[in-house]
Amino acid sequence: MTYLQIQGIRMEFGDIVAVHDVSLDVRQGEFMTFLGPSGSGKSTTLYILAGFQQPTRGDILLDGRTLLDRPSHQRNIGMVFQRYTLFPNMTVGENIAFPLKVRRRPKAEIDARVREMLRLVRLEGFEDRRIARMSGGQQQRVALARALAYDPPVLLMDEPLSALDKKLREEIQHEIRRIHQQTGVTILYVTHDQEEALRLSDRIAVFSQGRIDQVGTGAELYANPATRFVAEFIGDSDVLPAEIVAAHGTHADVRVGEAVVRGVPVHGAARTGAATLLLRPERITLARGAAGGLPATVTDVTFLGNTFHVAAVTPTGDALSIRLPFGHEAAAGLSRGEAVSLSFDPASAHVFA
């Protein structure tokens, strides 16, 4: 059931359109991530939700009521930023209690809620610790606890983990996922990190040039990208120039090099002519020797524990990445300069006309 509705939001800064008529429905309790590169409009959309910016046009409804007629401090929405915006002169407990004191909650309620939030973020016993003595990961947990202390209907998170190192970032990602499952709060999360989006989200809205290209689960976006941008932004991909030689509705026969591959799913209007073929590295089959399939030459082989990463180049100079599972017979003894033959299931590929 739709809980939060973004309806035709447009944001203009002079002659620049930062957000182009974005619409999105979010279910109550959903973890929705805005994913895209810098300048794609994802943070601007979040700031409009928070009330920091007023859109040129459009509306935002929360539980059927517009938010745009209320200033930021009256929307009762929680926010966590990349910069934690904690009060350095306060203790951990005082930081968490601050939004409750502003709302004039009784002291007994505040004390109980602070203890509850400390348990939630696993910082019991830290209530008297000064913020300056906390690590970056601990400070981010305090920021989460403070944002959730007053039980907001929606929690907005703008690149909250980008300042942390990889190990700590993954640890806090796990904590955010646990907290979401435990509290059921509706979360809108902004990131440019596709792995982070896949790890955390129920659904992902992929932003590109101020628009949403596609909304879906991580698996849906990976298996059935609606645009070339989504295909290349979600997961690793190999891109080859191709030619559609025959179109059959949603599928096409495609020439790649000297080979013709039949029945490849096509995106956009299926028509003959120049096209782009996208392959996932783990869906490419490699055979030793140059017989059959798409010929290529190995340029590098890297062992990554559970997989081998094989870099190769086609006769026309197009680079390819292939992932083979550990123990795959074709990977044993594979060396640079070796001729190989590549093939793939047409159903696993994507053609963009």
Image (cartoon, helix red, strand yellow):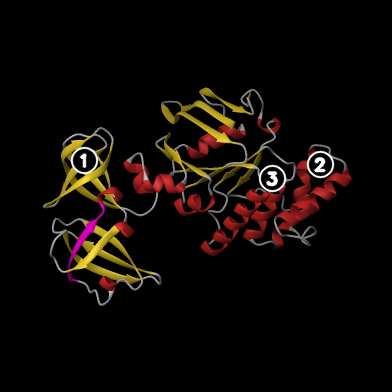
What is the distance, in whole Å, between disc 1 and disc 3 at their CAs?
51 Å
Q: Is residue 123 above or below residue 39?
A: below
Residue under circle 2? 101
Looking at the image, which is closer to me, 38 or 202?
202
Query: Which amino acid type corresponds to the residue marked 2 in the rendered image?
Result: Lys
Res. 90 in view = no
Mark sitting earlier along the chain (2/3)? 2
Q: Position of residue 168 (x, y in %)?
A: 57, 62
Whether residues under marks 1 and 3 lie with C-beta atoms below 8 angstroms apart, the answer is no
Residue under circle 3? 147
Looking at this view, name the residue that lies furthest to the bottom: 333
Q: Which residues are magenta?
A: 337-345
Residue under circle 1? 252
Q: Position of residue 210 (x, y in %)?
A: 43, 34
Left or right of 3? Residue 44 is left
Mark sitting earlier along the chain (2/1)? 2
- Secondary structure, mark 2, is helix
Crowd rating for badge 1 (residues with CA inside 10 Å; few <14, some 14–19, many 20+): many
